Image (cartoon, helix red, strand yellow):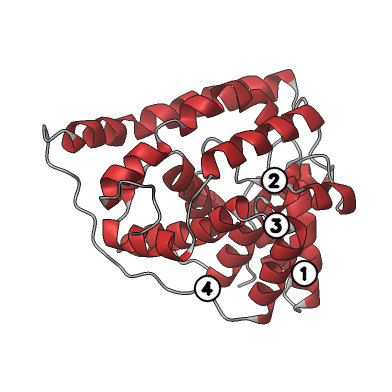
Amino acid sequence: MEARLPAGSDDPTVVGSNAWAALGGPPLSLGQKVGYLLSANLAYLEELPGEIRWILSSRGLFPAAEVASVGVQGLPETAAVELAIKQLERYAEGEREIVNHSYRTFHFADLLHRQESDAMPMDREVLAVAMLLHDVGIFPRAVAELPGNDFTVRGANLARHILEQAGWSPYRIDLAAQAITINPRPRVPRHWGAEAYFGRLAPLVDVVGQCWKLDAGDAREVFARHPADGIVPAILGAVATEAKRHPHSRFALLKPIFPFLLMNCECRWHRRLGTATGPRGG
């Protein structure tokens, strides 16, 4: 049976879909903005029980959630992943904060997926390429060289070029590209596929500080490989720059609340990992 992309992939009104990205990532309409904010509120309510349990357990008032260690596995060693790493480093031009975040996002998505005993199948190579390139479009060199209004569209266009070189099928190319462009949505339901679903959860774990979702030992190993020094100001700076460049984008809409979202990142990871100097795995 021929593989099919998730329902909605061909709908240009669905922000983050392949059809929307084909238009360059156009400005959000009023209706899209309202829907986006409503979805963000729903996502917050869905995460609230975990937030409350973490607050209570971190103060010794409630048992902490049990999370099994599944072990950190390396990136797939393939030509496509090697090309993605090479291009990520080229566009970053020596910047490490977003680059390390991109690596951590892959590992955290992979860990979250493998923690679920009945998780849906996932293509780790698709996940790796998508997560490595999900923020590449914010770098100045990418803005200058890659087409697309929205930063995710620039990243997806780069992914398409790389994956065509690597000889991927059109289906897998579309799947990876859409996992990039759909990533900033407040909620990505499971029907969009494991790569998009877990890829969306991973940045929340990393920079919003949802540290209770991972085993501390697994997380410590990821931070040891890819330190998080300076990630909060780097993210806030990238959001502000992208919002100014694309004033009717998703980042522009959420720019006022990003400081609130990121404010607990470092202190939560300090406590979870038992460190005093930051989430570096030490």
Q: Is residue 104 left or right of residue 279?
A: right
Task: Identify residue type, mark 2.
Answer: Ser
The correct choice, above or below, for 177 with respect to 270 in the image is below
- Image mark count: 4
Q: Earlier in the sequence, mark 1 or mark 4?
A: 4
On-image quarter of the C terminus: bottom left
In the current view of this chain or complex, which residue is farthest to the front? 277
Q: Residues within 10 Å of mark 3 (few under 14, many from 20)?
A: many
Q: Read off the residue under disc 1.
A: 162
Q: Read off the residue under disc 4.
A: 75
Q: Read off the residue under disc 2.
A: 17
Q: Read off the residue under disc 3.
A: 177
Q: Earlier in the sequence, mark 2 or mark 1?
A: 2
Q: Depth check: 84 or 91 in front?
A: 91
Q: Earlier in the sequence, mark 3 or mark 2?
A: 2
Q: Earlier in the sequence, mark 3 or mark 4?
A: 4
Disc 1 secondary structure class: helix
Tell me if label 2 and label 1 are in contact, CB under 8 Å.
no
Q: Earlier in the sequence, mark 3 or mark 1?
A: 1
Q: Residue 159 in the image: state x and y as whole percent.
A: 74, 62
Task: Identify residue type, mark 3.
Answer: Ala
Residue at image x 53%, y 35%? 186
